[in-house]
Image (cartoon, grey):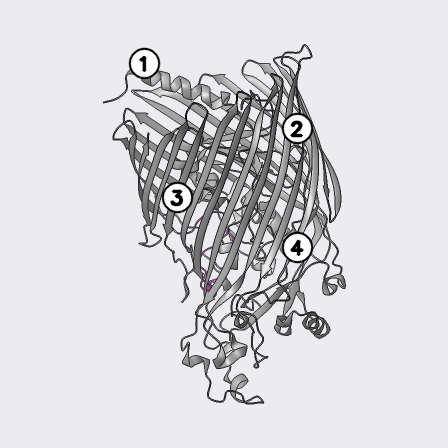
């Protein structure tokens, strides 16, 4: 039975009002500010939007479907980047977007993305969708309000805190017959009398690997199994004081193939074993173990936990306070098997514990908001407060056989593919920071608002920063609002970026097939290491940014909202990894003397540097329309982003033609999507068309002229749903309905098994179908 016309119309009117009048908490500390009243663009993504956007359990994928300026990449053969995926907002670095949960800073992942420019960001894949009530995405600089990292914007994840029960179960598979996915999730929200609520959410997902390669090894998505548990609670101790807390405990295990080793490659050269003194292993032959070559299997286990607790309340009707403490920890342990430590010859095991990395954070915050009545349209909102934060980064060595240099010292040492850190590379480093801020929001009239923020932050390793923000909004007519902002921002180099020493191995790009394969060992050293200092390494300092934005919001008719915003972001002293530098014999001997024993086989090295400046310009267009269409309700959404970055200056140690290509052409300049959702009674149909313009697969180890340009792509998603009861809904759908693939490689990488672009802003696995059952009580 369908709903009555009156009920349907009521739902339409509520949805129309909700699109522009939803209260937001991100980017403002005034409790009653709405989306339409915000001086900067804020997208509100509901729980329903998240559940219907994609069958992927990865929150990165869901946001990429809904926010055009948000991109997430899949790097299938790039060590830990295959598991902790780099995500960007407005084309900037992953760690230039601040992530909050319930308004509190989220801790970083322990993974540092050395295949790209060494970003260390939050792993959004650790957040289960069922725990969320909505997500607010602030697309504007906000370091003056929130501190380090908020250059591109802020993603605030709001946890569900209402009584009720939810359940989701889903299964799917790619058209090719692989990538089977299963997901079960549930949430229970229990009222604590009339004083509070405790909510517990859990999710289990199992994702099968995919293979879209053209060689022996599998190239595609890794297999992933994950448990994610989140809790959220609040309880009124007295009429004016509330106790609150939230936290999580997750375990995610991922594994992937990791670069096939050719049996004709140098690692198989019997002369090293048999013909060179001291003739240690005359009868040993690696072909006896791996006669057809071998593909190491690389795995990572991430254990993620956090706890936030605090008290908040009112001192008076005009003064609110919030005092909290925070703990967060992410540990990633690495394993690799079906491989060898070639330097150990027959004494080498074939499976290894390859070490671990740990990021730990502590923080304490005190925040106050005072409403001062100055006789204006609304009382002036004056917010102020402070923060203390401690960050710690730790590296642990794995098995001795995973890093040791054996007697066959001419062959690659350590677990081939991913050597463990040595005990000399392992260690624990930390730093403290302190901050204070002032944030003022003034509604002079119903039509005219201005805001300003100032923040001081001091770090005990590189000093202090001051940051500001000014914003304004003018309601020119009842249906047109003009808005704009100017701000400064910064991103502090992380403790991990300052201290990481690591080595990786892979095929020498200067020796591509059909030549015999050569395995090359590459190193990353701190910028303060004497080897780095000798060629210009210096202590790292914060990246600094200046942002400008201007736009308007239109609400010309009931149910219709449209916003257009222009932005420009200039960043100075951007962090990145130097060009690959060849190691001299003297430098190699010096590293070995420092305890970096694997340097004996090191071919190249890099280090972090504040080395270049960029300017990013773009336009965001977002529109939504809800109306009655025939017997049902039609909801239309459209979003478009134009984004282009330019490298404006830099140090020759990092700036080269490859970096220019990566900064300016790695991501599509144009992205967009159009969605339609039609509900008639118990039935619903939803579709989305996604567009990506051309991009260049900017690989740092290729000459720029050899990097391939890939054309624009369009993907279509379609789903249908049926409400069995008011509480239970069934959904079936297809993502990438027409199984579209990007252009294929035509160059040398195809010979290494890659069919599709490596640094791609979308999946390259073809279409997949899925079925989901959801229940809400």
Task: Say which residue appears at 44% left-offset and 49% top-offset.
Answer: 763
- Most common secondary structure along the magenta stretch: loop
Q: How far apart are marks 2 and 1 (CA)?
A: 42 Å
Q: Earlier in the sequence, mark 1 or mark 4?
A: 1
Marked residue nearer the N-terminal end (2 or 4): 4
| Residue 502: quadrant of the picture | bottom right
Is 82 displayed left or right of 211 in the figure?
A: right
Q: Mark 4 points at which residue?
A: 429
Q: What element carries label 1?
A: helix
Residue 211's spot in the image, x, y percent? 39, 58
Name the residue beneath numbered marker 3: 203
Residue denoted by label 2:
485
Q: How far apart are marks 2 and 4 (CA)?
A: 37 Å
Position of the C terminus, as image quadrant, is top left
Of discs 3 and 4, which sits in the foreground? Answer: 4
Magenta segment boundaries in residue numbering: 750-764
Q: Is residue 333 above or below residue 341?
A: above
What whole-number distance in Å separates the C-alpha atoms at marks 3 and 1? 38 Å
Q: Which residue: 37% across, 44% down?
A: 736
Q: How far apart are marks 2 and 3 (CA)?
A: 39 Å
Q: Which of the pair 642/491 is nearer the observer?
A: 491
Which quadrant of the figure contains the N terminus? top left
Magenta stretch contains residue 468: no
Gap between marks 1 and 4 measured at Cα: 63 Å
Q: Mark 1 points at which residue?
A: 6
Q: Residue at x 59, y 38 (%)?
A: 325
Q: Can residue 73 be seen in this view?
A: no
Circle 2 or circle 3, nearest the eye: 3
Where residue 350 appears, x then y in whole percent? Answer: 45, 72
**Rounded to the nearest whole Å, what is the CA distance between mark 3 and mark 4?**
33 Å
């Amino acid at each position: 039975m369908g709903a009555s016309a009156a009920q349907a119309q009521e739902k339409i009117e509520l949805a129309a009002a909700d699109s522009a009048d939803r209260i937001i908490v991100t980017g403002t500390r005034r409790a009653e500010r709405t989306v339409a009243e915000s001086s900067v663009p804020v997208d509100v993504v509901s729980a329903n939007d998240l559940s219907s956007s994609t069958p992927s359990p990865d929150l990165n994928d869901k946001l990429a479907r809904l926010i055009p300026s948000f991109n997430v990449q899949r790097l299938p053969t790039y060590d830990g980047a295959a598991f902790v995926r780099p995500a960007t907002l407005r084309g900037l670095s992953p760690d230039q977007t601040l992530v909050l949960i319930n308004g509190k800073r989220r801790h970083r992942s322990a993974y540092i993305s050395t295949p790209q420019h060494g970003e260390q960001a939050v792993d959004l894949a650790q957040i289960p969708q069922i725990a969320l009530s909505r997500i607010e995405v602030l697309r504007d600089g906000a370091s003056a309000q929130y501190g380090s990292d908020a250059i591109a914007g802020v993603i605030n994840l709001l946890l569900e805190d209402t009584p009720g029960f939810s359940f989701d179960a889903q299964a799917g598979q790619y058209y090719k017959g692989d990538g089977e996915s299963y997901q079960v999730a549930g949430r229970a929200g229990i009222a604590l009398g009339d004083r509070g609520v405790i909510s517990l959410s859990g999710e289990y997902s199992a994702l099968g690997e995919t293979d879209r390669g053209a060689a022996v090894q599998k190239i595609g998505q890794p297999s992933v199994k994950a448990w994610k548990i989140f809790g959220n609670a609040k309880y009124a101790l007295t009429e004016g004081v509330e106790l609150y807390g939230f936290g999580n405990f997750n375990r995610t295990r991922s594994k992937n193939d990791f670069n096939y080793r050719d049996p004709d490659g140098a690692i198989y050269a019997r002369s090293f074993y048999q013909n060179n003194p001291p003739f240690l292993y005359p009868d040993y032959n690696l072909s006896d173990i791996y006669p057809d070559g071998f593909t190491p299997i690389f795995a990572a286990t991430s254990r993620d936990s956090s706890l936030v607790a605090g008290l908040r309340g009112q001192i008076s009707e005009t003064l609110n306070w919030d005092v909290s403490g925070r703990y967060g920890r992410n540990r990633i342990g690495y394993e690799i098997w079906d491989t060898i430590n070639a330097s150990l010859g027959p004494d080498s095991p074939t499976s290894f514990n390859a070490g671990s990395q740990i990021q730990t954070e502590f923080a304490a915050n005190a925040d106050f908001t005072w409403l001062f009545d100055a006789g204006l349209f609304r009382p002036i909102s004056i917010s102020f407060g402070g923060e203390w934060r401690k960050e710690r980064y730790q590296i642990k060595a794995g098995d001795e056989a995973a890093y040791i240099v054996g007697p066959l010292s001419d062959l690659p040492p350590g677990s081939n593919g991913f050597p463990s850190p040595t005990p000399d590379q392992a260690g624990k480093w930390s730093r403290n920071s302190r901050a204070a801020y002032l944030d003022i929001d003034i509604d002079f009239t119903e039509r005219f608002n201005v805001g300003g923020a100032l923040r001081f932050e001091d770090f005990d390793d590189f000093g202090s920063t001051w940051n500001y923000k000014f914003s304004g909004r003018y309601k020119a007519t009842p249906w047109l609002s003009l808005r704009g902002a100017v701000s400064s921002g910064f991103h502090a180099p992380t403790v991990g970026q300052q201290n990481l020493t690591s080595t990786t191995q892979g095929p020498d790009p200067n020796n591509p097939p059909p030549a015999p394969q050569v395995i090359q060992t590459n190193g990353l050293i701190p910028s303060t290491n004497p080897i780095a200092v000798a060629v210009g390494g210096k202590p790292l300092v914060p990246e600094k940014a200046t942002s400008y934005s201007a736009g308007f919001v239109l609400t010309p008719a009931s149910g219709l909202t449209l916003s257009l915003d222009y932005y420009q972001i200039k960043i100075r002293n951007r962090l990145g990894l130097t060009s690959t530098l060849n190691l001299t014999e003297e430098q190699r001997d010096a590293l070995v003397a420092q305890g970096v024993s694997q340097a004996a086989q090191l071919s190249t090295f890099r280090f972090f540097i504040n080395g270049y400046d960029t300017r990013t310009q773009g336009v965001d267009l977002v529109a939504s329309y809800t109306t009655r269409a025939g017997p049902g309700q039609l909801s239309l959404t459209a979003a478009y982003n134009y984004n282009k970055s330019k490298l404006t200056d830099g140090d020759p140690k990092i700036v080269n033609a490859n970096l220019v290509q990566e900064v300016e052409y790695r991501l599509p300049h144009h992205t967009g999507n159009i969605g339609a959702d039609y509900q008639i009674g118990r039935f619903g149909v939803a579709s989305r068309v996604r567009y990506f313009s051309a991009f260049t697969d900017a690989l740092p180890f290729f000459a720029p002229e050899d990097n391939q340009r890939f054309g624009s792509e369009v993907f279509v998603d379609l789903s249908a749903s049926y409400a069995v009861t008011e509480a239970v809904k069934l959904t079936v759908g297809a993502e990438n309905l027409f199984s579209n693939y990007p252009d294929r490689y035509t160059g040398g990488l195809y010979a290494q098994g890659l069919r599709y672009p490596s640094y791609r802003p979308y999946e390259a696995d073809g279409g997949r179908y899925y079925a989901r059952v959801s229940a809400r009580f």
